[in-house]
Image (cartoon, helix red, strand yellow):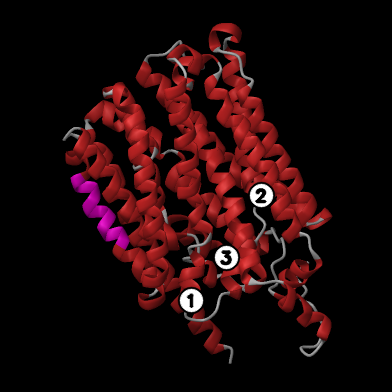
């Protein structure tokens, strides 16, 4: 499983994949896959504010209904590491194609099943339990949908341009938000409130299922091809989950899980949390706020692209450290912006997305280079799962609960704690890498 290809460097069969597989092919597969995943996420997240509190949790108050929906949203992130372990074993036994097909089939099935859910008034707690089950299915599937293309793209990127190539997987997030927000805007403006709650909200989940099918075929065409299989073998990107991997990479996995803490907390603080806050305090502005989110996503997309050029000049972790400091400052002023009305809300989103784009663009690969080659495929997947669970999974719930209990300032304090966590994790990772270099030198 950990063995490398034994072909000689001059073997023409080993050079063939490089001639047929271009970086653009890998990039397209990565963007398609990540866009479909983020579209799924944002469809569920927006429905957690606009639909589920009244359709699934109608027995609760508006605030508690959204809090319950946010807890269900978090279940997907809790299930991701479990899915990674299960599907890594499928990958090891039956191959990447079987794993990817099974994971995306589970994702599509769970997504489309949500669209058929009856209301709480019709089926009671069976509806609530079904929503939880299907959300965990989505999370487990996303953990299993890891195909290693992001790692392959990072390893094949030219020297001096690795920061720019690291942004490619992150582009899927703003694209997914734009598509999901635009679809919900169309439905809310085309249907009455009753029609939207009765059947209109179901269509985005059907669309998500269709996008998953397209993404499946696009990714399979690349991931299971002979050329790509050889590239994976050359890069030693092989599934490997065992106690030895966890011992060898424990510190880097922990650091990697917490380095994006500020970024991923901000991710939800400028997307899902403010949507809930607006819905509770000014529901008439919801459609307008979704438009603001689309503009913010475009700003974030620009920040993601810019982060690649900046990281190639200053270094990825230097950029993340500076962004964490910027997020800390933003955390202090953000409660004031949200309290200034519609214009303040727009500033809150635009400034937040600018910071998010710069930090999110480099957050996924901040520690990947620190993993041993034989561990990178699985360790990168596990690190991503844990970082999303700790950094983003419960962020909307915690932020809204703190806001409703103590006021807006407490949500800013929560984001500030994430920024401090990122700075601490970056320090830990730097020390770990220095110790590893010393150990490597001592063996020479």
Q: Compute the Cα span from label 2 to label 3.
A: 22 Å
The furthest residue to the front: 190
Callout 1 secondary element: loop
**Nearest to N terminus: mark 1 or mark 2:** 2
Task: Decide if residue 280 is on the left or right side of residue 21.
Answer: left
Dot 2 and dot 3 residues touching (CB under 8 Å): no
Residue drawn at x 61%, y 19% as measured from the top left? 117
Tag 3: Cα neighbours inside 10 Å, few (<14), some, or many (≥20)?
some
Residue that badge 1 annotates: 161
Q: Is residue 53 above or below residue 89?
A: above
Residue drawn at x 46%, y 22% as measured from the top left? 190
Callout 2 secondary element: loop
**Nearest to N terminus: mark 2 or mark 3:** 2
The magenta segment is 323-333
Q: Which mark is residue 253?
A: none
Dot 1 and dot 3 residues touching (CB under 8 Å): no
Q: Is 330 part of what is drawn in magenta?
A: yes
Give residue 127's quadrant in the image: top right
Residue that badge 3 annotates: 249
**Nearest to N terminus: mark 1 or mark 3:** 1
- Image coords of residue 230 (percent x, y): 77, 72
Residue 262 shows up from this direction: no
Residue that badge 2 annotates: 145
Q: Compute the Cα span from label 1 to label 2.
A: 26 Å
Front residue of this view, candidates 317 and 372:
317
Mark 1 or 2, which is nearer the eye?
1
Task: Decide if residue 246 is on the left or right side of residue 236.
Answer: left
């Amino acid at each position: 499983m950990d063995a490398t290809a034994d072909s000689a460097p001059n073997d023409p069969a080993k050079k063939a994949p490089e001639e047929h597989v271009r970086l653009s092919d890998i990039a397209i597969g990565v963007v398609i896959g990540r866009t479909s995943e983020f579209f799924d996420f944002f469809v569920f997240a927006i429905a957690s504010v606009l639909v589920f509190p009244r359709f699934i949790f109608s027995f609760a108050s508006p605030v508690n209904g959204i809090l319950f929906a946010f807890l269900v949203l978090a279940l997907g992130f809790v299930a991701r590491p479990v899915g990674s372990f299960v599907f890594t074993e499928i990958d090891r036994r039956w191959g990447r194609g079987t794993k990817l097909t099974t994971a995306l089939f589970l994702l599509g099935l769970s997504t489309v099943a949500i669209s058929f859910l009856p209301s709480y008034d019709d089926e009671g707690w069976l509806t609530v339990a079904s929503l939880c089950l299907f959300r965990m299915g989505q999370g487990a599937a996303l953990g299993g949908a890891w195909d290693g293309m992001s790692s392959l793209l990072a390893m094949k990127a030219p020297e001096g341009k690795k920061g720019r190539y690291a942004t490619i997987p992150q582009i899927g997030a703003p694209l997914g938000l734009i598509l999901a927000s635009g679809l919900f805007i169309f439905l809310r403006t085309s249907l009455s409130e009753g029609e939207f709650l009765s059947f209109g909200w179901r269509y985005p989940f059907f669309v998500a299922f269709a996008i998953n099918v397209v993404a499946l075929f696009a990714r399979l065409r690349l991931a299971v091809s002979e050329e790509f299989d050889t590239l994976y073998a050359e890069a030693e990107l092989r599934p490997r989950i065992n106690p030895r991997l966890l011992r060898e990479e424990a510190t880097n996995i922990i650091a990697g899980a917490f380095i994006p803490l500020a970024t991923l907390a901000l991710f939800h603080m400028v997307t899902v949390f403010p949507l809930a806050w607006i819905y509770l305090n000014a529901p008439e502005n919801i459609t307008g706020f979704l438009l603001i989110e689309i503009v913010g996503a475009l700003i974030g997309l620009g920040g993601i692209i810019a982060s690649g050029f900046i990281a190639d000049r200053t270094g990825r972790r230097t950029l993340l450290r500076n962004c964490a400091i910027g997020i800390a400052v933003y955390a202090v002023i953000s409660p004031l912006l949200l309290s200034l009305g519609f214009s303040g809300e727009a500033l809150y989103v635009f400034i937040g997305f600018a910071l998010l784009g710069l930090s999110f663009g480099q957050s996924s690969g901040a520690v990947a280079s620190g993993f041993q080659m034989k561990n990178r495929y699985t360790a990168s997947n596990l690190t991503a799962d844990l970082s999303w669970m700790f950094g983003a999974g419960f962020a909307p719930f915690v932020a809204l609960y703190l806001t409703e209990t103590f006021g807006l300032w407490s949500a800013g304090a929560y984001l500030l704690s994430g920024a401090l966590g990122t700075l601490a994790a970056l320090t830990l990772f730097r020390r770990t890498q220095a110790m590893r270099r010393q150990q490597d030198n001592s063996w020479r």
